[in-house]
C-alpha cells in the first residue's frame, strides 16, 4: 500500500511540472501578441471639394474681421453664400450673389481684413450716395487687403461702384463691368497701395486720392482718370479714356500706351508741383483744348514717343513756372493752334527729336529752353521776349515728292493721306482704287500766292474729273466704276505751299460678321459676350437692339467690336427666345444689319426627391446610397451636384453629391433635426436646389446584464436560460440581438441571442476567462453593446477507488471505502448503491451507509454483485464518477484469533484532494513564468486488520 501511495505522488508531481511549462509558454505568446497590437496604427484621410455656392439675392452686408459688422469671416463662411478657408490656396469666396444696397449704405463692405478673399461673378447695385469721398459703394474695402475682385458687375450705384478706402492694399480688381455710378466708377482713397486694376470696362471715372501709391492700372476703359494729392509711383498702361488729370504733388507716375481722345478739356493735365512723371507712347487726339497741359511748378516730367494730333488748341502747352521738362521723340501734327507752346516763365525745358507736321513751336516770355534736332513739315519756331534759347539741328522739309513732275514719275500715295507740299512745279501722284469707291481730293492753299488746279486721271491717263476754281481750295469727288490705278495731277501757277488731303468713300454699306453670340446659343443671367467684325473704311457708328417678340429695345451703342451685351438690358428680359440685331452705318448714311437668335435660360435644374421623406429618422450611420432616390432634371444637362447640412446653428461646407451623405459630414451634425440642401447647376451656371428635413438620433440601445454575475464559473455544460437575465432597451424598439465570445486569442463569430449559449458554440471555446459581448440594434441601425466576464472550466474530477477492491466478497456488515478525488476545486462528493438514485454525500473516507447496505444485501442472493458508484463535482459543475462491484457473500463466523489478526494496525495516508494555484510571477530572460503553489491534503488513518 505504501508503494502505491508513492506512485500516486510521483504522478501528481509530473502533472504540476507540465502545467508550469504550459503556463509560461502561454504568457510569452501573449506578451508578443500585445506588443504587435500596440505597434499597429491606422491612418485615415478625408477629401472635400468646394463647389460653387447658390446664386442668391442678399441685403447689404458688412464683414468686419474685428467684429464690428454683421459677420466676421469665421461667421460669414458658415452662411450659404460664403465658402473657403481664408488661405492663399483656398481664399474666402463670395460668388454668384446679387446685393441691393437699398440706398442705405454700401452693398457689401469688407473692413479690417487681411486674410485672402475673392469676390466673383456678383452684382452690386443701388448703394447710397453719401457725403464724403469713398463713403459708400457697391463694394467698399475699408482697411481690407489681399482680395481678388473678378468678373463682377457694378451698376446704378448712387456714389461709387467700387471703393478702396483707408489702407486697402494688395488687391486685384479684374474683368469687372461698372456703369452708371453717381460719382466715380472706382475710387482709391487714403493710402491704398500696391493694388492692381485690370481689364475694367466702364463709362465712369477712376479716382486716386490722397497718397495712393504703387498701383498698377492696365487694359482698362474709363471715362476720365484723376490723380490727386500725393499719389506717387503709380503705373497706367494700355488704357483708354478721355483724359488723365494729375494734380497736387503727384510724382513719379508712368502713363504709357494709352489712348486719350475726345475730351472737352485736355487729354493729360499735370499741375501744382507734380514732378518726375513719365508720359510715354500714348495716342492723344481730338481734344477741345490741348493734348497735354503742364502748369504751376511742374518739373522733370518726361513726354516722349507720343502721337499728339488734331487737338483744337495746342498739342502741348507748358505754362507758369514749369522747369526741366523733356519733350522728345513725339509725333505732333495737325493741332489747330500750336504744336508746342511754352509761356510765362517756363525755363530750362527741352524740346528735342520731335516730328512736327503742320505744327510749330511757340515760346512766350520763357528763357533758356532748348529746341534741338526736331523735324518740321509745314511748321516753324517762334519766340517772343525770350532769352537764352538754344536752337540747332532742326530741319524744315517743304516737298517730300519733289521728283514727281510727270505721270511717269508719279509718286505712290495711300488713301487717307495728308501732305504739306511746296508746289514749285507740276506734281503727279497715283493710288489704286476699287469699283464702288468714291474718292474725295482736297487741296488747300493761299490763292494770293498763286493758283493751283486739280485733275483726276484713269489708268489710261484719261482725265475723268477736274477742279479749276480760282478760290483758296480745290475739291474733287468721283465715283469709281472700274478698279485700277488712278492719277492725281496738281498744276498751274507756282505756289509756295499747299495741303493735300485724299479720302475715299465706300459706296457700299458696312459689312457685319457676327462671331459671338452664336445663332441658337443659350445663356443664363449673365449677359452674353459679343464678338463682331465690321468692315467699313468710313464707319459712322454701330449699335445693337434686342427684340423680345413684341417690341425692340432701345439702341445700345457699340464702343468696341468685342464686349458684353448691356447687363441692364439683359436683366429686363424674361426667360425665352430673343433676336439680337447689330447695325452699322457709314458716314454716307448707308446702313447694314445682321441678326442672331439666342435663348435666355435662367431656370436652374429641377431636383425631385422621392426618398427619404421629410422627418425620416436616421441614426449614427450616415444615410447611404440605398436611402436616396433623387432625380436631377435640366434641358441643358447637369454640370455639377453638391450638398450641405445644417441644423440651424452648424452649417457644413459644400461637398460633392455622390448619392449619399459622407460619413465625416454626417458626424459634424449632432443629435436632432437637420436639413440636407442638395444643389445642382446646369451647363449655363443656373443653380437649383432641394431640401430634405431629417431627424438624427445618435443615442444607442441600452443592454442591462443582471445575470450572470461577473467572473461566474461554468463548466462543460453551456450556460442556459436560467443563467441569464439580460434586458435590451430602446425607445424605438430592438431590431435584432446577437453576441460574440472572446477568449484571447479565440474570437467567435456573431451568434443570434436567444437567451442562452448553444452547447456547440460553448464546446468551441477554450477554458479560461471568457468575455460575452452582447449587441443589439434599433430600427435606425444604432448599435448598443455591453459585456460581462465569466470563466469556463472543463476539468472533470478524477476518482480513484483504493478500497474496497472490485468484485471482492463482502458480508452483511457495510464495507469501508477509501477514494482519492483529483480536482482543483471540489464542490461535492457522493455515492449511490445498487443503481438506486438515492445519493449519500461524504466529505471524507468512511463506511458505506449501513441501512442502505443491509437493505440491498438482504435483497440479494449469495454471489450477486452490488454496484457502488462514487461521484464528485467541482465548482464549475463538472461531474466525475467511478464505480466498483462487490459480491454479496455469506461468511462463516470467525474465532477470536482471526479477529486479532484483522485488528493489526496499518498506517496509511488517505489523499482526498490536491490543489494547484498560481501565487506569483517570475520573469527570467524576458520570459514570464508562474510560480505555482501545490497543496496536497493527506489524512492519516489507522486501519485495523480483520
Image (cartoon, rainbow, N blue to C red):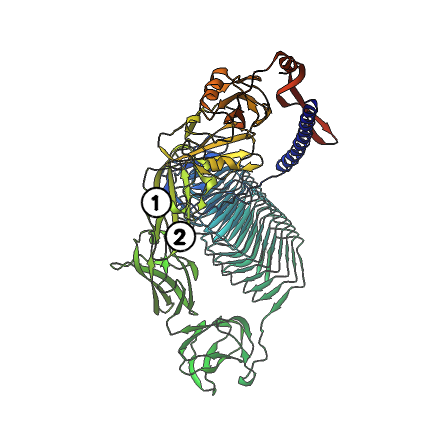
Residue 718 got which mark? none
Res. 62 in view? yes
Circles 1, 2 touching at the beta carbon (< 8 Å): no
Say what secondary structure mark 1 lies in.
strand
**Residue toward you, 324 or 835:** 835
User: What residue do we see at 54% from left, 65% from top?
Assistant: 358
**Residue toward you, 771 or 627:** 771
Q: Is residue 652 above or below residue 581?
A: above
Q: Is residue 890 above or below residue 792?
A: above
**Residue toward you, 745 or 720:** 720
What is the x, y in percent for residue 448? Answer: 49, 72
Q: Residue furthest right?
A: 925
What is the x, y in percent for residue 507? Answer: 38, 74
Q: CA distance from mark 1 to mark 2?
A: 16 Å
Which residue matches tag 2?
685
Q: How many marks?
A: 2
Q: Quadrant of residue 650?
A: top left
What is the x, y in percent for residue 561? Answer: 43, 62
Looking at the rendered image, the quarter that the C terminus falls into is: top right
Q: Residue furthest left?
A: 550
Lower sequence index among marks 1 and 2: 2
Say what secondary structure mark 2 lies in.
loop
Res. 875 in view? no
User: What residue do we see at 53% from left, 35% from top?
Assistant: 765
Q: Nearer the viewer, mark 1 or mark 2?
A: 1
Which residue matches tag 1?
690
Task: Answer few, some or many: residues within 10 Å of disc 2's Cα (few below 14, many 20 plus, some between 14 and 19).
Answer: many
User: What residue do we see at 64% from left, 61% from top?
Assistant: 353
**Residue toward you, 865 or 929:** 865
What is the x, y in percent for residue 563? Answer: 43, 58
Amino acid at each position: 500500500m505504501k508503494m502505491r501511495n508513492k506512485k500516486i505522488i510521483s504522478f501528481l508531481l509530473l502533472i504540476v511540472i507540465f502545467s508550469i511549462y504550459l503556463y509560461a509558454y502561454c504568457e510569452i505568446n501573449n506578451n508578443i501578441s500585445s506588443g504587435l497590437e500596440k505597434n499597429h496604427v491606422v491612418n485615415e484621410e478625408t477629401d472635400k471639394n468646394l463647389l460653387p455656392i447658390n446664386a442668391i439675392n442678399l441685403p447689404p452686408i458688412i464683414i468686419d474681421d474685428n467684429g464690428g459688422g454683421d459677420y466676421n469671416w469665421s461667421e460669414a463662411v458658415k452662411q450659404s453664400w460664403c465658402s473657403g478657408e481664408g488661405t492663399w490656396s483656398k481664399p474666402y469666396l463670395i460668388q454668384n450673389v446679387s446685393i441691393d444696397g437699398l440706398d442705405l449704405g454700401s452693398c457689401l463692405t469688407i473692413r479690417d481684413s487681411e486674410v485672402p478673399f475673392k469676390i466673383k461673378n456678383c452684382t452690386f447695385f443701388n448703394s447710397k450716395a453719401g457725403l464724403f469721398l469713398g463713403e459708400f459703394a457697391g463694394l467698399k474695402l475699408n482697411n481690407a487687403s489681399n482680395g481678388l475682385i473678378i468678373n463682377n458687375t457694378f451698376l446704378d450705384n448712387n456714389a461709387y461702384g467700387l471703393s478702396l478706402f483707408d489702407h486697402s492694399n494688395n488687391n486685384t480688381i479684374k474683368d469687372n463691368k461698372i456703369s452708371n455710378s453717381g460719382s466715380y466708377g472706382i475710387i482709391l482713397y487714403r493710402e491704398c497701395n500696391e493694388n492692381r486694376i485690370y481689364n475694367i470696362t466702364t463709362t465712369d471715372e477712376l479716382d486716386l486720392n490722397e497718397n495712393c501709391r504703387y498701383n498698377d492700372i492696365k487694359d482698362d476703359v474709363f471715362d476720365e482718370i484723376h490723380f490727386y494729392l500725393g499719389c506717387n509711383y503709380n503705373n497706367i498702361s494700355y488704357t483708354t479714356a478721355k483724359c488723365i488729370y494729375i494734380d497736387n504733388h503727384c510724382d513719379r507716375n508712368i502713363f504709357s500706351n494709352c489712348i486719350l481722345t475726345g475730351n472737352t478739356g485736355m487729354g493729360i493735365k499735370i499741375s501744382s508741383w507734380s514732378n518726375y512723371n513719365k508720359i510715354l507712347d500714348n495716342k492723344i487726339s481730338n481734344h477741345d483744348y490741348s493734348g497735354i497741359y503742364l502748369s504751376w511748378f511742374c518739373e522733370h516730367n518726361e513726354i516722349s514717343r507720343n502721337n499728339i494730333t488734331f487737338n483744337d488748341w495746342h498739342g502741348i502747352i507748358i505754362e507758369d513756372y514749369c522747369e526741366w521738362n523733356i519733350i522728345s521723340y513725339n509725333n505732333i501734327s495737325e493741332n489747330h493752334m500750336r504744336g508746342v507752346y511754352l509761356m510765362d516763365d517756363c525755363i530750362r525745358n527741352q524740346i528735342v527729336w520731335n516730328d512736327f507736321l503742320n505744327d510749330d513751336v511757340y515760346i512766350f516770355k520763357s528763357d533758356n529752353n532748348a529746341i534741338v534736332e526736331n523735324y518740321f513739315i509745314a511748321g516753324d519756331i517762334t519766340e517772343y521776349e525770350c532769352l537764352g534759347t538754344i536752337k540747332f539741328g532742326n530741319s524744315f522739309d517743304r516737298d517730300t515728292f519733289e521728283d514727281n513732275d510727270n505721270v511717269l514719275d508719279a509718286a505712290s500715295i495711300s488713301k487717307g493721306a495728308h501732305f504739306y507740299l511746296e508746289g514749285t512745279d507740276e506734281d503727279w501722284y497715283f493710288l489704286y482704287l476699287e469699283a464702288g469707291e468714291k474718292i474725295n481730293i482736297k487741296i488747300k492753299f493761299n490763292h494770293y500766292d498763286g493758283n493751283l488746279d486739280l485733275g483726276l486721271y484713269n489708268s489710261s491717263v484719261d482725265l475723268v474729273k477736274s477742279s479749276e476754281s480760282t478760290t483758296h481750295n480745290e475739291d474733287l469727288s468721283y465715283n469709281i466704276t472700274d478698279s485700277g490705278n488712278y492719277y492725281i495731277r496738281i498744276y498751274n501757277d507756282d505756289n509756295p505751299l499747299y495741303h493735300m488731303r485724299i479720302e475715299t468713300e465706300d459706296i457700299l454699306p458696312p459689312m457685319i460678321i457676327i462671331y459671338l453670340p452664336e445663332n441658337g446659343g443659350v445663356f443664363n443671367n449673365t449677359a452674353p459676350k459679343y464678338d463682331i467684325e465690321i468692315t467699313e473704311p468710313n464707319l459712322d457708328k454701330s449699335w445693337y437692339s434686342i427684340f423680345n417678340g413684341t417690341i425692340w429695345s432701345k439702341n445700345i451703342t457699340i464702343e468696341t467690336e468685342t464686349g458684353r451685351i448691356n447687363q441692364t438690358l439683359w436683366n429686363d428680359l424674361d426667360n425665352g427666345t430673343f433676336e439680337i440685331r447689330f447695325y452699322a452705318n457709314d458716314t454716307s448714311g448707308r446702313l447694314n444689319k445682321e441678326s442672331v437668335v439666342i435663348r435666355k435660360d435662367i431656370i436652374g435644374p429641377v431636383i425631385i426627391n422621392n426618398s427619404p421623406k421629410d422627418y425620416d429618422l436616421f441614426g449614427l450611420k450616415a444615410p447611404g446610397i440605398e436611402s436616396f432616390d433623387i432625380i436631377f432634371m435640366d434641358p441643358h444637362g447637369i454640370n455639377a451636384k453638391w450638398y450641405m447640412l445644417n441644423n440651424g446653428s452648424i452649417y457644413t461646407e459644400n461637398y460633392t453629391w455622390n448619392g449619399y451623405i459622407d460619413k465625416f459630414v454626417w458626424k459634424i451634425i449632432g443629435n436632432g433635426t437637420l436639413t440636407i440642401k442638395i444643389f445642382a447647376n446646369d451647363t449655363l451656371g443656373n443653380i437649383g436646389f432641394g431640401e430634405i428635413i431629417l431627424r438624427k438620433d445618435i443615442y444607442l440601445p441600452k443592454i442591462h446584464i443582471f445575470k450572470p454575475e461577473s467572473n461566474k464559473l461554468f463548466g462543460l455544460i453551456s450556460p442556459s436560460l436560467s443563467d441569464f437575465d439580460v434586458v435590451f432597451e430602446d425607445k424605438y424598439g430592438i431590431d435584432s440581438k446577437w453576441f460574440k465570445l472572446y477568449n484571447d486569442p479565440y474570437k467567435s463569430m456573431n451568434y443570434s441571442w436567444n437567451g442562452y449559449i448553444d452547447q456547440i458554440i460553448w464546446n468551441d471555446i477554450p477554458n479560461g476567462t471568457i468575455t460575452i459581448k452582447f449587441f443589439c440594434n434599433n430600427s435606425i441601425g444604432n448599435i448598443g453593446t455591453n459585456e460581462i466576464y465569466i470563466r469556463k472550466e472543463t476539468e472533470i474530477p478524477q476518482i480513484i477507488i483504493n478500497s474496497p477492491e472490485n468484485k471482492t466478497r463482502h458480508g452483511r456488515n457495510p464495507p469501508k471505502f477509501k477514494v482519492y478525488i483529483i480536482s482543483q476545486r471540489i464542490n461535492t462528493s457522493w455515492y449511490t448503491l445498487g443503481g438506486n438514485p438515492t445519493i449519500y454525500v461524504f466529505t471524507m473516507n468512511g463506511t458505506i451507509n449501513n441501512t442502505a447496505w443491509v437493505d440491498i444485501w438482504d435483497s440479494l442472493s449469495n454471489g450477486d454483485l452490488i454496484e457502488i458508484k462514487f461521484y464528485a463535482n467541482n465548482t464549475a459543475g463538472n461531474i466525475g464518477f467511478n464505480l466498483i462491484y462487490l459480491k454479496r457473500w455469506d461468511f462463516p463466523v470467525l474465532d477470536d484469533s482471526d479477529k486479532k489478526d484483522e485488528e493489526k494496525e496499518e498506517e496509511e495516508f488517505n489523499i482526498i484532494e490536491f490543489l494547484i494555484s498560481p501565487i506569483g510571477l517570475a520573469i527570467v530572460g524576458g520570459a514570464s513564468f508562474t510560480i505555482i503553489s501545490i497543496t496536497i491534503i493527506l489524512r492519516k488513518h489507522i486501519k485495523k486488520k480483520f
